Amino acid sequence: MDIKAYLTCKKPRRSNRLVEREKENKTHKTIKYGPLGVFDVLPIELKFHILKYLSIEELSILTIASKAMRNLVEGYRVTRPIGRHLIPTPHPHIQLPQEKHMEYFKQYQRLGLLMKRSTCLYATKDRLKLVNDFLTMIMCCNSNVCVSPEKCLALSCFGKFMHTVIAGWDDSECQRAFDAICQHTSILKNMKIVINSKPGIHGKLERETRQFFRKVFLDHCPTVQDRAFWLSRILKPWPMVHQAKILYLLYGASFDTGDILWYEMCESTPANSEESVKYFGDIANAIQTLHSQTKEWSEDDIISVVDELTSLPEEWLAENVSHLLLMCGDSITSKLMTSKAINGRTVELCSITTSFCLVCVKNNFSLNYVVTLIQNIIQVMENPKERIHFINSMMDMFKELILDIHEFSESDETHEGELFFLVSALSEFTKRLIQVAFKNFLV
Ligand SMILES: [Zn+2]
């Protein structure tokens, strides 16, 4: 054994000038050629300490600067999960004033961008695991500080975050994200219980299911196409009758507490235009959204869903059906009505068209729309007898409705307003018809 190999120097040097110079050269080289430049010579604790002073945007820009920088930021992100960057303060489980919401969602959007950029080289499976970890960290049931799960922003914040992370992913990857999140939270189990039970039995589960799907997948979609995509993911695995129920579960009328008004459509009509928007606005919008997704939803699918929807949990009042259709737009209404005409469902047609007149009068809409609709219906009826029968039945229905309501209004004053609207509807409708019939003499 050569003992000399273990001796650093045969003779101690009096000056360490050369050692210093060597050190200096090394530092100089590291700064010049190292992947992180000046940053490379700092110890890791100091690097992380500096990163602490950067904003989320600055961090996310750093991740796309170089691979080494991405690794550094990713290391920081993973090892400092409760750093101020990763859960913005105040905590999303406390209630914030409305005007603060957007600002807060923006923070989560930035956070999503950081996650998206820093994990861009990972496999989809690993990225989804990170998304799910984030959800676990933020969900209400994991928080001791959640004051009210109905009003809490946590799920909405996660929705914003998730949509930012998966922006630009192709449809199959988005489907995987949907499956992974549903599996992780077992939300589909809740959905199954709700769907297979009588409406309103599991009020809490219904509220939770609605909130989860709305806040995570639907409310933060950047475009209508995106919303149609996610809505299709939620609805498509179920049979048609369940699709209608889920649609109502997600977008149907609800109390301020979040409880769903399942029987309202079968029992009462909206008192004013504000209430009618509350009743039908969201659900009509959702139906239009699906209608725009022609790849997955044929017109017949939409008609079937609307048909199921309006007999759920029992047959809706005709006025409510008309109101919903009016909000769904011409194309859907026309298709639904002509399909009823082809199938010989004259009584339904009459009750919806008379109600259309009533809704138009109540909301100051023009009745020209109803006249055009009736023209479309008559055109698809093959037999002239059928057409006459439809027109006569419609006018008879007006008569019956007026007589019925008149009888009620004698014993109950609340129906007096209804009688006025019904008679006005008939007279307005007749005016339009007379104008059409005598149009050559009127100009
Ligand atoms: Zn909460």
Image: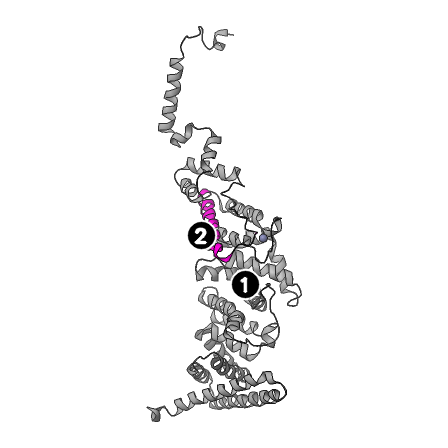
Q: Which mark is residue 133?
A: none
At which x and y percent is residue 393? 53, 89
At which x and y percent is residue 73? 46, 38
Q: Are marks 1 and 2 in contact (CB under 8 Å)?
A: no
In-front residue for pair 431/412: 412
Does dot 2 land on a helix, a strand or a loop? loop
| Residue 280, above or below 228 | below
Asked if residue 395 is among those painted magenta in the image, a careful observer would answer no
Asked if residue 96 is among those painted magenta in the image, a careful observer would answer yes
Q: Residue at x 48, y 67 (%)?
A: 285
Q: Amino acid at mark 2?
A: Ala
Q: Residue furthest bottom?
A: 441
Label 2 sits on residue: 167
Q: Residue at x 54, y 51 (%)?
A: 92
| Residue 183, above or below 262 | above
Q: Residues within 10 Å of mark 2 (few under 14, many from 20)?
A: some
- Which residues are the magenta region? 92-118
At which x and y percent is residue 175? 51, 55
In-front residue for pair 72/45: 45
Measure the alpha-carbon separation of dots 1 and 2: 21 Å
Report whether the residue tagged 1 is closer than 8 Å to ligand 1: no
The mark total stands at 2
Label 1 sits on residue: 235
Q: Residues within 10 Å of mark 1 (few under 14, many from 20)?
A: some
Q: Amino acid at mark 1?
A: Leu
| Residue 295, above or below 347 | above
- Looking at the image, residue 422 sits to the left or right of residue 202; the answer is left
The structure's colour scheme is one colour
Q: Is residue 430 visible?
A: yes
At which x and y percent is residue 405? 58, 87
